Image: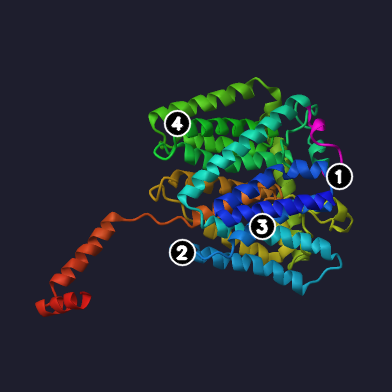
Amino acid sequence: MITFGFSLAAFVLCLAAANKSLRDGILALMGVGYVYGILRANYPDVGTYLAFDAAVLGLYIGQLWRPMTPPQRRRSHDLRLWLTVLIAWPVLLFIAFPSDSLLVELVGLRANIFLLPLMFLGTRLSEDDMFNLAIGLAALNVAAVLLGVAEFFMGIAKFYPLNEVTEIIYRSKDVMGQTAHRIPASFSSAHAFAGTMVLTLPLLVGAWVQTTRTTKGQRSFLGIAIVASLLGIFMAAARTHMITAALLVVIVTFSGYLRRDQWLRWIAVIGLVGYVVYGQERLQRFTTLQDAGFISERWTGSVNENFFEAVRSYPLGNGLAGGGTSVPYFLRGTQSPLVMENEYARIALEQGLPGLAIWCTFLLYVFVRWPSRKVDGWGFGRQLGWITCGVFFFSALTGIGLLSSVPQTVLMLLTIGWFVSAPKPVRVATQFRSMRARATAVSALPVTAVSASVVEVE
């Protein structure tokens, strides 16, 4: 019964925060997401498993139905149409093709649609919202990495008991010649830890570079959080996320966006992280990427001919949760054995070829436009978010769980909604030409017409 109390507390917390403001609701949800993994590991039960879902539901009830301003409605119009299609197709499959394992189907439906409305909430985020989220996420990252440091030196057994929920954590003993575990911090896996840290970097860096908005103390705290986040990625030892983090570091370094003093501080940050990583062999799992044979084998194992064979066998899918969606341990006996380590294969196996086509077209809509830096102070942050999300969807070719990872998926979907709905830059020259044309048209009117217009206005 106590585990259902966790779900109730998560729901009430996020509902109360969401009723206050969108950014408070998101921060409350992220707080629940940051402790969800370690909470579920120590209290493995249905009630704890549903805690994050309850938190998301609280955010939805508090914010999803609130009226939008006309500019928000215009910017989110296309995305709202896409969300309708992305959600409607799995729901149609759920209704049209009922399964003997209804609970497993419900888990699959949840994994395919439940978090998607977060993109819609991302369209409502203002500049101030993003700044407050960056500060809040900086605090959460520092706390999570401190816990990760404790696990690094004391071992994960003191924080994560061995049970059905923590199997993946204990199987990830592949650091330093199979002698050390990857670090999960407070998350359900080391991969979720690293992915969350990576997805916070666009916000942290985007806020850190805004010297007119931030105080000296805030910039120092954001700098500490950036260092902690990068170290957390190396402690988690997830190679894909290491590559993404390295790409972001290179882009920020050579973007030309940083002023000289900022650039020197950034180099100092990278130097500090590099020094720590160089001195700890446990942080150097990325060196295995030098093995070209391993990379080829991993790629072939994820993107292979079995994908096309499975699609031919199940053109309308194998049922929701029938292609790799993570099913809780208490339902695993009824899960389909057909699993491929490829997020696009999972979508095809669960939603069929129409579902895969919908998703591919949607991703083309999302990533075909490059966010402008000239909109507001968050232009650079949006570009980093665009790059990060793009790399995540590309790397989904060699892994699954992209749309159901807690709380990584929350950040990714919010970021997509945020940069897709960015206001367009104002073209001053175009405005001037338009004003001049209107002035010319007015001057060409007869005097009586102009006088009548003036009288009518008065």
Label 3 amino acid?
Answer: Gly
Disc 3 secondary structure class? helix
- Tell me which numbered mark, 1 or 4, is placed earlier along the sequence: 1
Q: Badge 2 is on which residue?
A: 69
Asked whether 394 or 111 is in front, the reply is 111
Asked whether 351 or 331 is in front, the reply is 331
Disc sitting over residue 216 in the figure: 4
Q: Badge 1 is on which residue?
A: 164
Q: Quadrant of residue 114?
A: bottom right
Q: Which residues are magenta?
A: 155-165
- Tell me which numbered mark, 3 or 2, is placed earlier along the sequence: 3
Label 1 amino acid?
Answer: Glu
Mark 3 touches mark 4? (CB < 8 Å): no
Disc 1 secondary structure class? loop
Asked whether 306 or 457 is in front, the reply is 457
Label 4 amino acid?
Answer: Lys
Q: How many marks?
A: 4
Q: Where is 305 relative to 318, above or below?
A: above
Residue sitting at 53 percent across and 38 percent down?
A: 248
Q: Quadrant of residue 172?
A: top right
Residue sitting at 83 percent across and 66 percent down?
A: 102
Residue 253 visible in the snapshot: yes
Q: Badge 3 is on which residue?
A: 58
Q: CA distance from mark 3 to mark 2?
A: 22 Å
Q: Residue furthest top?
A: 279
Residue sitting at 23 percent across and 63 percent down?
A: 435
- Tell me which numbered mark, 1 or 2, is placed earlier along the sequence: 2
Q: Is residue 232 left or right of residue 157?
A: left
Q: Is residue 441 left or right of residue 252?
A: left
